[in-house]
Amino acid sequence: MNRFMQELTKGLWKELPPFRLLLGLCPVLAVTKSASSGIGMGMAVLFVLTLSNMLISMVRNIIPSKVRIACFITISATLVVAVELLMQAYAYPLYLQLGIFVPLIVVNCIILGRAEAFAAKNPVHLAIADGLGMGLGFTMSLTFLGSIREILGAGTWFGHPVMWDGFQPFTIMVEAPGAFLCLGLTLAAMNYGTHRQIMKKSREGSEELPASPCGGCRACAMGRNKD
Amino acid sequence: MSNSNNDILLAISTPPFWHCGRTIRKNSIHTLLALVPAVILSLIQWGVPAARVMALSIVTALVTEAVCQTLMKQKLSQDNGTAAITGLLLAFLLPASAPWWLVIIASAGAMGIGRMAFGGYGANQVNATLVGWALVFVSFPLYMDPNASLLQTTLIDPLLRAKYFGGAAVADFPLSDLLLGRQLGGLGAVQSGALFVGGMYLALRGIIRWEVPFSFLVGVFLSASAFHLANPELYAGPLFHIFSGSTVLAAFFLATEDSCSPHRRLPMLLYGLTGGVLVLLIRTFGMYTDGAPFAVMLINLLAPMFALIRSHPFGTVPGKARQTSKTEGGTRA
């Protein structure tokens, strides 16, 4: 159970998909024009990611490793079609808003990445935890970015006006350059915070290698050790 | 270099030991000097509102730079004048009627996102001035449009007229009006004549390399001639395109920013030429009337590509030089 919680929570901050792993950036940049489309896209990915992780983990011992990628894609494509049909039936406006990016979840690298890196090597319950955690982290990040861009770019949040009366919407934030600006500044802020934490820790003189700020390659920490 | 003469410090330094005396500060002073005629003409034309926009833009740029440098624990460098130039050039691109918050957003964006986010002067890939300009131009098109704002003026925007009524509509637009800035647009960018004089001064002093503005204007001239010869009814002539809008400002002051333009003669010529052609393409086929600032942003991004065109090292044969470098790389790997 402890391991389960660990896999579940790592996607929420330590390996937050778009900001720490930098995976699945295509929808992060493209559909975060508003908080609601961000949350919708996040939910779709959450659904696909959890189920694909579960299915892949179940069949991981049956698939020959040479054709595993094809199998992963078949499984996730099936799930994406299911999501697409469900969206058309129950959330048609959202489906229109997200457009091509729903079918594109198939080739979203976060689905394949988690399948290859985690689900194909771990038992079912851990794979589900990983998918849930990553999906929740992804939804959180998309909603966060979407909120910033919607508040600055349109003066609303989930469609409700939140800014003062004379507010001039900052239109560039809901255009494509705004997505890059927001993502870049968020990444910079997160890296700065992590860097400061590490510095603080190493100043306190802990012997342990500090966690790498960039998703776990630990190259920087190792480089620092060599010096 | 930073040690003053009073320090008794026997430092070992690498060559070059001989220094020509050029500093960023001196370059900035010459650039500001070159902008003075345009400032005076725009003050005569627009009066106090123009002075307000320019002052606010410069002050915001200086303050933003100081704040960012304090946060980044860098040495304060407001005295080298580069921030002031960025602020002034940005003000040149804004209309005289720009509201105060628009000027502050543009100027803070130019320094904050355009320059300091990349690490400071000389580290930015795209001209910082244009980043600030694009930020407000895309966000607040209504306030950036001198036609729609409350300027009490009878001037017309020649580029707007050329775009929507064809080249024939501006065929009798007097060149002297264009040169003296009697056209509607950014408050200083339209002072083509004054900017041309200032730009020539910079080029002759060697502050900017002549290749970039020259080939930029040649690019505009050639492509405008091609369009004009193909259909003079629809497309305005080459001189009109050179002296209308912000072409001259872009050629002499924006495209030449040190960190965003390539070195060497051939890359610089190609860089400018591409920019000139892009100006005409955006003006003719794009959705914006004045393509010059966007064209400069695009060639700024292309500058690293142009910089790949190198001459071979002295004393080697081109083909052989490449081979040796390949084997060197092989052994290292």
Image (cartoon, coloured by chain):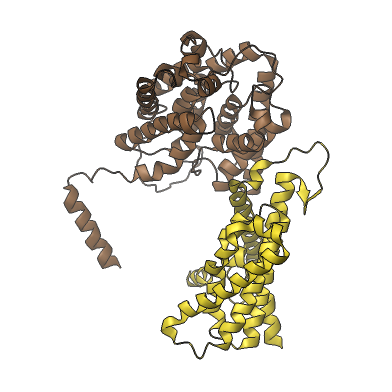
Chain colours: A yellow, B brown
Give the quadrant of residue A54.
Answer: bottom right
Task: Mark yes or no: residue A216 visible.
Answer: no
- The answer to whether residue B229 is left or right of residue A184 is left
Q: Which residue is drawn at 69% across and 70% down?
A: A136
Task: Mark yes or no: residue B293 visible.
Answer: yes
Q: Where is residue B289 in the image (x, y as percent from the top left)?
A: 53, 27
User: B157 or A210: nearer the eye?
Assistant: B157
Q: Which residue is drawn at 72% across and 63% down?
A: A91
- The answer to whether residue B268 is left or right of residue B180 is left
- The answer to whether residue B302 is left or right of residue B95 is left
User: A64 or A142: nearer the eye?
Assistant: A64
Indicate the quadrant containing the N terminus of chain A: top left, top right, bottom left or bottom right. Answer: bottom right
Q: Where is residue A83 in the image (x, y as percent from the top left)?
A: 64, 70
Give the quadrant of residue B181.
Answer: top right
The correct choice, above or below, for A48 with respect to B322 in the image is below
The correct choice, above or below, for B286 with respect to B160 in the image is below
Q: Position of residue B237 (x, y in %)?
A: 41, 18
Q: Which residue is drawn at 63% across and 39% down?
A: B109
Q: Where is residue B88 in the image (x, y as percent from the top left)?
A: 59, 26
User: A216 or A45: nearer the eye?
Assistant: A45
